[in-house]
Amino acid sequence: MRRVAQCLVPRTLRGRLSLVALTTAALIMTLLTVVFNLAITRHLQHQVDTELRNRAEAVATTVDTSGPEARVLETVNDRLLDTNVWIYADGRLLERPSSAPLHGPLSTTADFLARRREQACTTNAGQPQVRQCALPLPGRHSATIVTAMSLGPYRSSADTLLVASLILDAAMLACMYVLTRLSVGRALRPMQSMTDKAAQWSAVGSETRFGAEHQPVELARLGGSLDVLLDRIRTVLRHEQQLTGELSHELRTPLTRMVVELDWWQVHPRSAQETRATHRVLTEAAQSMRTICDTLLDDARDRALDHTAVPGTTDVVPILQRLLRQSCPPDRIRTSLETSAPVVQAATAPAVLERIVSPLLANAVRYAHTAVTVVVRRTADAVCLDVTDDGPGVPAAFVEELFVPGRRADHDDGHDGAGLGLPLARRLARSVGGDVSFDRGHRSGARFTVSLPVG
């Protein structure tokens, strides 16, 4: 039964609204039709009762109750007045219609009404139905006049009105259903258009929005909701593109190490010890790739869920030493690490610290002329890491775009960077309560400062 009911329910919103409107209108019109026909029936019955009383009053003028015995006076229109009329006096039947048998249903009902000695009417069931009314007369004798009238013509009029009202109701319901479907379809047309546009804009991450101006209240609210959803979809797409770019950017270095080691191992014969060294390099590179993926994916998941990760505590000096060893600078470039204390604790996870510092070291080694220096210093409320190189520095016109994803100062500088390293470093530093900044006052080369919470 439930499946049948589901099949009968229209699938479209326009069909459902039209069905609801049709059902509501049918109930209202049925109620109005019933009330109208009941009112018509009562009105016709009142007309019949009035006609019967008027006829009884006319017949009463022919009944003389002033003498010792009640008697019926003969008049010119006596035959017309005596039609369907019973006259009683002192409990005796003085006159009855010739067409009504003495003990028939009409005469029996007339006797009953006459004995009640009050003004009353009743309907005698039959084919056709007959309405009878009694009118008692004042005077010495207890006289009562009972008149009768067939309800056939009135019933026929009532039935005709009922059929006409049902036909009119059916026509009005059909017109209402058609008009409702047209109106609802026209009203839903802007919603369909908004739905199509939202689907199109969400697929490409468009910045176009519906807005609330020059819109009805309902469409303005719908447009606002769709705008919020489009903003969220665009943010998700942007995060997805950013994560993809960051992964490709960060994985490029360990992948390059693996490719170089494998190429060198295949081209030149290696001893067992050299093969084991190659295996260690590949293992370290693979481990580095896994750490990069875990770090970036965890950060993306925390941002998507709006979670604040609980920072760990890391000694920054050993990690910086290892990163400097793995940076593979050319022979002409000297790298050094300066620290005010052998142990400096920062409130961040080791993997996050690596991902923050690695892009800064890679840029410093890439652009330095002779030296790259990393200085670790401790302030009252932060651990600061200064990464300095003696290269050409950052062009003044590009300083404002240093941390904008995808921007590079010179696309023809000989390396295939994507402009994502510095933005990634700053974003990760800020995710743990720190920051990455560029020292505008440093004149010889470039200096970037990483500030992290104290561990």
Image (cartoon, helix red, strand yellow):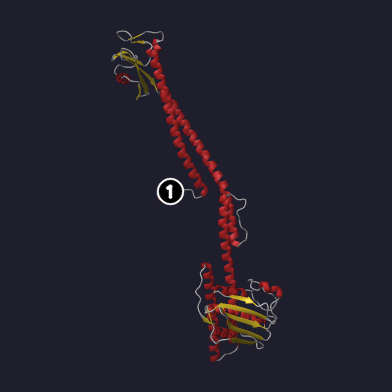
Q: Is residue 117 above or below residue 328?
A: above
Image vertical order of residue 208 relative to residue 60, above or below: below
Name the foreground residue: 397 vs 267: 397
Left or right of 82? Residue 221 is right
Task: Give left or right: position of 49 versus 195.
Answer: left
Disc 1 marks which residue? 5
Q: Residue at x 59, y 69 (%)?
A: 241
Q: In this rendering, is residue 154 above or below 167? A: above
Q: Residue at x 69, y 85 (%)?
A: 369
Disc 1 residue type? Ala
- Answer whether residue 266 is visible to the viewer in this image: no
78 in relation to 132, above or below = above
Q: In the rendered image, which quarter is residue 141 located in?
A: top left
Residue 348 image offset from top left, x and y in percent: 53, 78
Asked whether the viewer can see residue 280, the reply is yes
Residue 263: x and y in percent read 60, 84
Determine which quarter of the picture holds residue 409: bottom right
